[in-house]
Amino acid sequence: MLSTENRKDLIKYRIERAYAVLQEARDNAKMGHWNLTGNRLYYSVFHMCQALLLSEGETPRRHAGMIHKIGMDFITSGKLDKYYGRLISRLYELRQSGDYDEQYNATEEEVVPYFEQVEALLEAMNQIILNQLGQL
């Protein structure tokens, strides 16, 4: 069990990691590496989801568990818009296809529109976390 201070530190690390990985996505997009860009977009959201769940004392161990917990705790409750639940699922699918489907190649047209959406989702989750941190 993490102490409150250690939990806060881990949450802050995950938030920082989310934004660092978003920058990796931008860097890969500049080079035209669309599968890798999709991967990094997903992982930027993944790290922020982990921070968000940790702010409520949750620590899912698998991607599917994380997505499920976000859906149950934040989408269904209305803390996050339903659109974000679909976005997380779509980014997960994009990452899975790009990483494991030998015949799949993401395109610029497919991936670039996600940047703005991911940035909005990260900010929405970060606001919830900031509210939670005040209560820790």
Image (cartoon, rainbow, N blue to C red):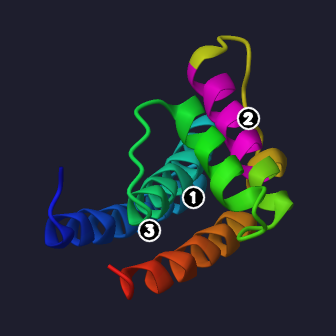
Q: Is residue 59 above or below residue 118?
A: above
Taking the image as shown, residue 83 lies to the left or right of residue 4, namely right
The secondary element bearing badge 2 is classed as loop
**Magenta region, mostly helix, strand or loop?**
helix
User: For the residue carrying disc 2, how many other residues have a C-alpha within 10 Å: few (<14), some (14-19), or many (20+)?
Assistant: some
Residue 24 appears at what percent x and percent y? 44, 57
Q: Residue at x 44, y 62 (%)?
A: 56
- 60 over 97 or under it: above or below: below
Q: Over which residues does the magenta segment extend?
A: 87-99
Of labels 1 and 3, earlier in sequence is: 3
Amino acid carrying mark 3 in the image = Tyr
According to the image, label 1 marks what residue? Answer: 30
Residue at 73%, 12% (x, y): give it: 103
Which of marks 2 and 3 precedes in the sequence? 3
Q: Position of residue 58 (x, y in %)?
A: 42, 50
User: Mark 1 or mark 2, which is nearer the start of the sequence?
Assistant: 1
Alpha-carbon span between mark 3 and mark 2: 22 Å
Residue bearing mark 3: 19
Relative to 67, residue 136 above or below: below
Q: Are marks 3 and 2 in contact (CB under 8 Å)?
A: no
Assign a secondary structure to mark 1: helix
What residue is at 66 percent from the left and 14 percent from the top? Answer: 101
Magenta stretch: includes residue 100: no
